[in-house]
Image: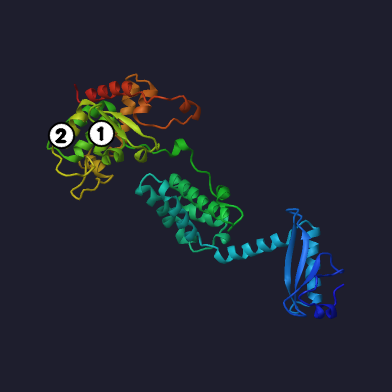
Amino acid sequence: MISDAKARKLSPTDKPLSDGGVKGLYLFSGSIVGAGKWIFRFTSPETRKRRDMGLGRYPEVSVKLAREQAWATRQMVETGMDPLEERARQKEQRRVLQEMPTFEHAARTVHAGAASGFRNQKHIDQWINTLVEYVFPKIGKRKVDEITVADFASCLKPIWLEKPETASRVKQRCDKVMKWCVANGYIMASPVGVVDQLLPKQPGNRQRVEHHPAVPWHLLPEVYSAEIASGHISDTKLMLEILILTACRSGEVRMMEWNEVDFNKAIWTIPASRMKANSAHRVPLTSRVFEILQYKQQIKIDNNPLVFHSRKGTPYSDMTMTKFLRDQRVESDTAGRIATAHGFRSSFRDWASENGYPRDVAERALAHVIKSSTEAAYHRTDLLDKRRLMMQTWQNFIMNI
């Protein structure tokens, strides 16, 4: 066994001293007589490789203290733990505790990292704004390792039944933030997954669906003639015409660019970046839509890439068309509510069903996602020619041709 007398005589050229009291404990010589370094040598039960673990320097660490440390370390090895790995884990744990973020900090970090995956700035803002409104005021300044299931339930409870769709989105976003915390080692598991157990049952999907007020399809020719096709020409009316005749969404029409329009083939190709399904969509241009685009091209006086834009050169607001319908008090199929621009897609879908068009053709015109992955795998065509005939018939119906 190593004694203080032996250790004090250890010179720089001496071989390491092995301590017989604890297996694996060695004192390696230092640069001067009587100085050395304690090393505990062992075979890792985790990696099966030989490892050396420093226990300090002699004489700062005495023989007795080195032997006690070595004994405790040997016990760890005997129980299947690698003391060096355990030391690293404890160090990492201390680092994590020191760097533990607040929920708001974690949420904004996740939001910044995910922003490039959103379709547009509106969706980017919506993601974080819901947390700003419903979550940050209550738990935004709390460290993520302190937040419980009950804390998330208290944030969601005020909107859980009143605004179920919003509540579901807020829950999903909170869960994403907490799972990011799990991935970064701040917590062991996300508490958001079981928050439903502390909240009342939400209404089912059928009960919570809120349809956009729409003009009944059989009344659309009258509305088109009286409110849209008559009077002075405006961008709002022209956008509404295109929206109705193509059954496209408001944003797709408002953001239309000239380079998306092929006048030779009478096709408007909306890029994937602007489609809800994140897939490019070809729209056949009916004769009236073609005429509107030709008119806009003839009066074009600048190099703005947008077909329709405000005086500032920016896209029109997403409320532009719906405001026009409100101003004209265009009634819908929902009692007491004015029709919305998005509702015209429902008008078209009802007309297509009532007039015997195949579901697949109508759904393609609306660019709806095929929910069945098996069915989607066999769809290799967008049925453009069939859709062109259908959309021209739709136009003829609306314009009473």
Q: Which residue is mark 2?
A: 295
Outermost residue on the front side: it is: 13
x and y percent of residue 172 in the render?
49, 47
Image quarter (top left, top right, bottom left or bottom right) of the N terminus: bottom right
Q: How is the image coloured?
A: rainbow
Q: Earlier in the sequence, mark 1 or mark 2?
A: 1
Circle 2 packing at 10 Å, graded few (<14), some (14-19), many (20+), is few
Q: CA distance from mark 1 to mark 2?
A: 14 Å
Outermost residue on the left side: it is: 232
Mark 1 vs 2: CB contact within 8 A: no
Residue in the picture at 56% in, 56% down:
184
Q: Nearer the viewer, mark 1 or mark 2?
A: 1
In this view of the protein, which residue sits in the foreground, 151 or 43?
Answer: 43
Residue 228 image label: none
Q: Which residue is mark 1?
A: 261
Residue in the picture at 29% in, 22% down:
390
Q: How many numbered tags mark residues here? A: 2
Label 1 residue SS: strand
In this view of the protein, which residue sits in the foreground, 370 or 4?
Answer: 4
Q: Is residue 336 visible?
A: no
Q: Is residue 8 visible?
A: yes
